[in-house]
Each structure stands twice: as C-alpha cells, then as structure tokens.
Amino acid sequence: AQTVTQSQPEMSVQEAETVTLSCTYDTSENNYYLFWYKQPPSRQMILVIRQEAYKQQNATENRFSVNFQKAAKSFSLKISDSQLGDTAMYFCAFMKHGVEGNEKLTFGTGTRLTIIP
Amino acid sequence: NAGVTQTPKFRILKIGQSMTLQCTQDMNHNYMYWYRQDPGMGLKLIYYSVGAGITDKGEVPNGYNVSRSTTEDFPLRLELAAPSQTSVYFCASSYFQRGASTDTQYFGPGTRLTVL
C-alpha cells in the first residue's frame, strides 16, 4: 500500500515571499502520478499541479513548481511570490498508474498555509 | 459547463436516519469517486465507479452504498446514519482512456454532514 506523508501541519509566510511545502511518499511502484491539491476555506478541492513519475523534468504552473526527487521519494511544492489567495490547506496525493485506470488517490494529511499581509 | 455538482451543501441527520448525497458531472467522465474527509485529515476513498452499472469499494465503504445508472450521476446512500459518519463528503470524476495518461480527478464542492 502507498502512503503519503506531509510533515508540516502548518506554515506561514509573508506576502510576496517564497514558501516550500514538503511531501514524501512510500511506494514500490515505478509508474505513478503525484499531485498537489489546494483546499481554500470554501472547501473546494482545486488541482494545483501534477507530475508524472516517468518525466524527469519538474512540473511548473505559473508561480507553482515542484521539486520531484524520485529516488528519495520526495515531492515538494514551491510557491513563489505568494499571494493572500494562496492561503489554504494543501494536500499532496499519490496515484499509481494502472492499466485499467481504476487507481485511487492516496492523500497526505495536509499542510495549512497562511499568507500574512 | 458546471463540472461536478453536489447536493445538499449541508445536512444534519439523527442517528439511524438515512439519506442520499447527490453527485452529477457534465464532463462526460467515465470514472467517478466518493471520498470522505474527517477533520484534520486527507480524503479517503469510499466507493468508485468506472462506468455506468459498475461500482467497487474503496478504503472505507462500510455504512454506505452507491449506484451508477447513468454516466452523469453517482449518488451515495447512507443507511442507518451513525456519529462516525460525520464528515465532509466529496464527489470527484475523471476520464480514463486505455493507453492514455491517467487523467486528473476533478472534485465537487463537498457536502458537510453531521450526525447527532
């Protein structure tokens, strides 16, 4: 079974600064996907970024980027030029690649990020 | 294109009551999922469906039932509600095509359920 660990329950950073959220996972699979989801106070789960394990290049979406270290099983999220709207819970999630596609997301326990004005 | 919609947004049940949480998606996704999120925790999979007429258990299925009579709808039924089912429930959907990269799951806004 896969496990996802987020060791930072809470973080805070000043507006416009850069912050990195940590995530490690445990799996014996070689082909899988990793995701960061954002959950603002509205509770909506919003996809921030995804990474395919077979890709060596780190994924980037505007101010969001990841540092994917496959050998270390580490998948951190970097938020640059942080904004007040980035305040939310952030969940790291793992999904192994299956032929039938019926693979499930395994979530970490989340990191509560607060951006301070 | 509304995406994934869920009703109701909030509900309070008494112990032993039953209810159905509704989930509809208009993206023509073949895969649909139900998760629950307990306070301070990540989401856990309750049930999922890979197409109309096909459902399967996830990590925490006890106390729940699902059906998938159409591609769009995936209702979650709670029979004999218990306080342990107090949680936030999320429905999600994705599109899978054999041979293609796994698609992202898109989530509904959630239903907050309290059982007293």
Image (tube, coloured by chain):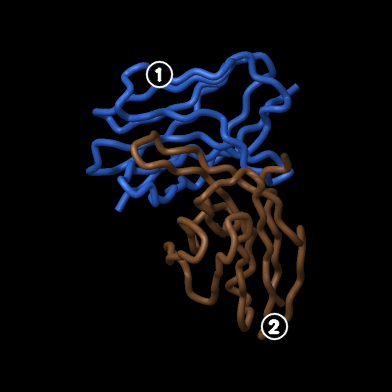
Chain colours: A blue, B brown
- Give the amino acid type for the residue marked by disc 2 in the picture: Gln
Which circle marks residue A58 in the picture? 1
Identify which residue is drawn at 51% across, 50% down: B30
Give the secondary structure at mark 1.
loop
Instruction: Tell me if mark 1 has few (under 14), some (14-19) or many (20+) residues whose alpha carbon lies within 10 angstroms of its own.
Output: some
Does mark 1 fall on the same chain as mark 2?
A: no
Mark 2, residue position: B17
Q: Which of B65 and B101 is in front in this view?
A: B101
Q: Which mark is residue A45?
A: none
Q: Quadrant of the C terminus of chain B?
A: bottom right
Q: Nearer the viewer, residue A108 or A115?
A: A108
**Quadrant that contains the N terminus of chain B:** top right
B80 relative position to B105: left or right: right
> Label 1 sits on what residue type?
Asn
Q: Tell me if residue A8 comes above or below residue B87 in the rendering.
A: above
Instruction: Identify the residue shown where x is 59% and y is 16%.
Output: A63
Q: In which quarter of the image is residue B7?
A: bottom right
**B67 lies above or below A35:** below
**Is the residue marked by circle 2 packed among few (<14), some (14-19), or many (20+) residues within 10 Å?**
few
Relative side of B95 to B107, left or right: left
Residue A104, image x, y percentages: 42, 51
Q: Looking at the picture, how far across and down is residue A23, in whole percent?
A: 42, 35
Residue drawn at 47 percent across, 30 percent down: A50
Of B66 and B88, which appears nearest the observer?
Answer: B66
Chain hosting mark 1: A
Q: Nearer the viewer, residue B78 or B97?
A: B97
- State which quadrant residue A44 falls in: top right
Name the residue rendered at 28%, 36% in the picture. A31
Tally of marks: 2
Callout 2 secondary element:
loop
